[in-house]
Image: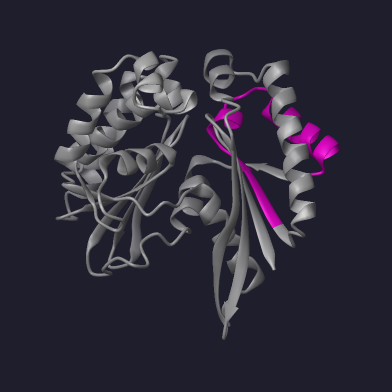
Amino acid sequence: MKYAAIDIGSNAVRLLIANIINNDGVISFKKNTLIRVPVRLGDDAFLKQSISDKKAAELVKTMVAFKNLMEVYQVEDYMACATSALRESKNGAELVKKIKSVANIDLEIVEGQKEAHIIYSSHADQTLERNKNYLYIDVGGGSTELSIFSDGKLKASRSFDLGTIRILDNQDKEETWDSLKFWLRNETKNHKGLIGIGTGGNINKLFKLSEEKEGKPLSFIKLKTQYQYLNSFSLKDRINILGLNQDRADVIIPACELFITVMKYASIKQIYVPKVGLVDGVIQVLIEKNFPKI
């Protein structure tokens, strides 16, 4: 049995096809295929508040390809989500209809709070100690989702209009940064010793570059050192010398700035990077829908 998750983000569009495993009633999944297409809808959404015809055509073609792949893989259920780029586009609803018409994919534009809920549905904290306090930090192209867990329970969650593409396009607002810092100070003051859990493509790349051992946390000091090192290179040299993909080489800098800011104002000294994201959460949501607990 296979399920699929589609994430239409501000920087890239992803398809995850996962094998569903039923082990004596315990349902889990294993990633089968993950495809990432750097459509970068955020450049249109945050600057023009509308997706251009060119980007819309690219998105629809991608969805047709994803639909074909899901059929080839014999996917039994799927869920497709669009986040901040389509949330803020005047023609977002129109694109949802176009995708349904051409690709026969039902697409939902999810609000920030639901996005945060899906991300923490990824169960990234399952292998961590339940009696400690954690802050989920998911940095996307258009928004950053934060969720506080204590004793294994969600205590607070918030979505902020701060993301890597939005920052690159100078569409981030000072008052949003202030709101982020205030929320962090206020919500984390009663949760001492917070440990970070970072999700998203950029923190995965940063963790890989850090050469830390799998399962070990990345320290705040090491993250700051990485940021200074990466920022010492021009965009061109980050691509040619460091070997970063073009669509990663620019966004990794504002991603660093966001993670460093969140960790600073939440007094977080180390962050775990479990390699999960929205698509993993979507698969978990599908499992919970199709295998309800009795």
- Residue 235 position by quadrant: top left
- Does residue 172 appear in the picture of this structure? no
148 relative position to 239: left or right: left
Residue 237 pos. (x, y %): 35, 17
Q: Is residue 238 left or right of residue 122?
A: left
Left or right, 121 with reference to 263 = right
In the image, 53 versus 70, the foreground residue is 70
Determine the residue located farthest toward the right in the rendered image: 101
27 in relation to 259, above or below: below
**Which residue lies at the image location 32% right of the left edge and 38% below the top edge?**
206
Q: Magenta stretch: residue 112 in it? A: no
- Looking at the image, the residue that sits furthest to the front is 241
> Quarter holding the N terminus?
bottom right
**Along the viewing direction, whichever of 140 and 183 lies nearer the viewer:** 140
Q: Is residue 191 above or below residue 55?
A: below
Count the numbered circles shown.
Answer: 0
- Residue range highlighted in magenta: 78-105
Please report the residue visible at 51 percent of the width from the left and 46 percent of the height from the top: 115
How far across and down, in percent of the image, does residue 188 sit? 21, 48
| Image position, residue 161 (x, y; %) | 43, 30
Q: Residue at x 32, y 22 (%)?
A: 175
**Corner quadrant of residue 85:** top right
The answer to whether residue 164 is above or below residue 111 is above
Quarter of the image that includes the C terminus = bottom right
Residue at the outermost bottom position: 24
Q: Tell me where residue 81 appears, x and y as whole percent.
A: 62, 44
User: Where on the picture, by quarter, is residue 261?
Assistant: top left
